[in-house]
Image (spheres, rainbow, N blue to C red):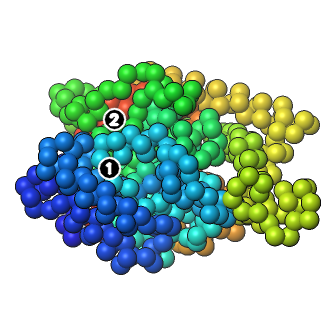
Amino acid sequence: MKDYLTLDAIQSDLQAGDTTCTELVGQYLARIEQHQHLNAFVEIYADGARQRAEEIDARLAAGTSGRLAGLVLGIKDVLCYAGHGVQAGSQILDNYISPFTATAVQRLLDEDAIVIGRQNCDEFAMGSSNESSYFGPVRNAANENRVPGGSSGGSAVAVQAGLCHASLGSDTGGSVRQPAAFCGVVGLKPSYGRVSRWGLIAYASSFDCIGPITKSVEDAALLLEIMAGDDDFDSTASTREVPIYSKNLKQDEGAKVRVGYLRESVESEAVEPAIRQRTLEVIEQLREQGHTVEPVEMPLLKYGLPTYYVLTTAEASSNLARFDGVRYGYRSEEAVDLESLYKKSRTEGFGEEVRRRILLGTFVLSANYYDAYYTKAQRVRKLIRSETERLLTYYDFLISPVTPTTAFKLGEKTDDSLQMYLADIFTVQANVAGTPAISIPNGLDENDLPIGLQIMTKAFEEEKLLAFSKHLTKITVTPQIV
């Protein structure tokens, strides 16, 4: 199968008659079959994808196809698709069929995207390695003994291994960017509110964002452009006008920008030498191009992770209360009364990590500890947001590594929750502050494992972020697609 970097290349071949949507779907299905051991998908929509491909081929022949004709898409198992299962990687939603489609998914379908299946993820998007899924761990295609990152690990591996052209993931604390970095692909977290969350199974409602995982910045821009915008079903969706991101990717070569790099991330001893070296090389090349690149300090950065976990576990405790074994999903066969139905269904249906976070969240929301933890964390979140906004009034962009390490071994951190949580240390800032951030490939380490570079900018300035990221891809090294 031909490896396409961009949708534009696919559509050129479609127009030339060199391939069809039906052929593309057949080729992706064959690759999925060959790479079952990666465990990237939990369900394949083979018949539906083939039927839809035939319909889009007919529209292509008639000249009435949508902007995404030829795009074969995978969706993370937290996004609803009417008439299809959705489980959030959990037993608690066993056999649940969604009665509606998420707004972000529907907008892509309306432009003739083809959804080929739902993808494995950490249970309820809680994890940094895709090892907490009820369906088992996902394996990194670059090294099958390594994790793909989480929680959107299946979505990143599917793009990395060529099992679909693009994926939709969700990012609560880095869950699009971190797996994108571990897998050598592009992962975009939009500003909070830029994309409707309607139809996304909630983990932490004030943090969750839907974002694309692609092979190119161009495709990430196009998918965001189509998904973004106001939505009557989601009061947190912004009413701001959506720019034409896909047409404004050219960075003015004469324009010079101000870039700050977070000293705490680039110079930390916890950052692997290869990641530090690749980040510093990008910094030096930007300076050679005449851009201003300076180190910045953000002492509050060390409070980002505890703030994130206090607030997200609190929100998860509330959001996950609806999964009780009464209305839908898994129901314990050991229950003898209503109270035991709740207890046993939730204990058996939720995995260890989800139970841990629910308990943490319930604790910080309890009457005796609410002010000591939850209220204080909200205050710190406001300080982090204010400091991030202050830095971004002086600098056009903030850059850092996406992660302190490249992909670690399967099982390496499963017994140490703190070490697992630290994998998100550089990504949570954008979620706490609500700003957009992107991970782009930045070469390989000595073990041929992908490295990612993170770029952040002001809220709702994705247009600038995408154009600068496209420019940066000329000086970073993109790992070969598997």
Q: Residues within 10 Å of mark 1 (few under 14, many from 20)?
A: many
Give the side of residue 461 with respect to residue 78, left or right. Answer: left
Residue 457 in the image: state x and y as whole percent: 42, 31
Up-down: is 154 above or below 439?
A: below
Residue 134 in the image: state x and y as whole percent: 63, 67
Residue 59 in the image: state x and y as whole percent: 20, 48
Type of amino acid under label 2:
Glu
Mark 2 sits on what residue? Answer: 225
Work out whether mark 2 precedes mark 1 in sequence or the reverse, and give the earlier one: 1
Mark 1 sits on what residue? Answer: 113
Type of amino acid under label 1:
Ala
Q: Is residue 132 visible?
A: no
In the rendering, which numbered label is found on residue 218? Answer: none
Nearer-the-camera pick, 442 or 461: 461
User: How far apart are the alpha carbons under marks 2 and 1?
Assistant: 14 Å
Residue 445 in the image: state x and y as whole percent: 38, 65
Give the side of residue 444 with respect to residue 309, left or right. Answer: left
Residue sitting at x 34%, y 37%? 226
- On the image, which quarter does residue 230 sit in? top left
Q: Secondary structure at mark 1?
A: loop
Residue sitting at x 62%, y 63%? 95
Q: Quadrant of the C terminus?
A: bottom left
